[in-house]
Amino acid sequence: MAAASTTARADAVELRSLVAALVRRFSLSERADMLCCGLTVAQAATLEALREGGALRLGPLARRLGITPSTLTRNLARLEADGLVARDADPEDARAARVRLTTAGERTAFRVEQQERAFAEGILARLGPARRGEVMRALAELLAAVRDATEECCPGAFDHLMEGRASSGGRRGRDGGQDGCCD
């Protein structure tokens, strides 16, 4: 029994290490892609949230992004200065504003989405068709296990954090190349 416990512990350490490395590497790739477009990862996530959700009030947008309102305000100031988002009066509450993508913001969000999708396609191509389905099923199973474990310790937390996200719970993928990105 002690050997099984030791193996389970070692597997848990390896799982955390592999997931951390995967997240770190995706994050580095994502940052490189966003820099190509003149955006931070947070700004790209804001554009993506507005592209998916339409015009949003600041509170719901901050919750969707998982950031504080003050962080969102700084983020939006740069996006507004770059002409990618605009604030309009909320028709339901004159004291509030809704943030929306401008035409330039829609184009940039679309380009970022294309880059992300192409990047993910490139990764899947490296796995080959035989392994692709297996890896995707394993990742979906891992995500379900994380959701179940999170639900046990913090009921509702996973759903709250994933609110407004695609069912995969992540960003959609990107194009990897710098030629013509976000121009």
Image (spheres, rainbow, N blue to C red):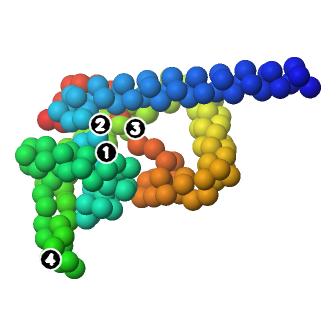
Q: Give above or below for 153 relative to 131.
A: below
Looking at the rendered image, the quarter that the C terminus falls into is top left
**Residue at left 55%, top 52%?**
158
**Residue 151 location (% of width, % of height):** 64, 53
**Residue at left 20%, top 77%?**
93
Q: Secondary structure at mark 2?
A: helix
> Label 3 neighbourhood size at 10 Å, few (<14), some (14-19), many (20+)?
many
> Label 2 neighbourhood size at 10 Å, few (<14), some (14-19), many (20+)?
some
Residue bearing mark 3: 173
Q: Secondary structure at mark 4?
A: strand
Q: Are marks 3 and 2 in contact (CB under 8 Å)?
A: no
Residue 115 shows in this picture: yes
Looking at the rendered image, the quarter that the N terminus falls into is top right
Which amino acid, by three-letter code, is at mark 4? Ala
**Residue 35 location (% of width, % of height):** 22, 29
Mark 1–mark 2 Cα distance, whole angstroms, equals: 6 Å
Q: Secondary structure at mark 3?
A: loop
Most extreme residue toward the bottom is 92
Which amino acid, by three-letter code, is at mark 1? Ala
Of labels 1 and 4, earlier in sequence is 1
Mark 3–mark 4 Cα distance, whole angstroms, equals: 38 Å
Circle number at residue 45 = 1
Of labels 1 and 3, earlier in sequence is 1
**Residue at left 25%, top 65%?**
57
Mark 3–mark 2 Cα distance, whole angstroms, equals: 13 Å
Which amino acid, by three-letter code, is at mark 2? Val
Q: Are marks 3 and 4 in contact (CB under 8 Å)?
A: no
Residue 137 shows in this picture: no
**Residue 17 figure quarter:** top right
Which amino acid, by three-letter code, is at mark 3? Gly
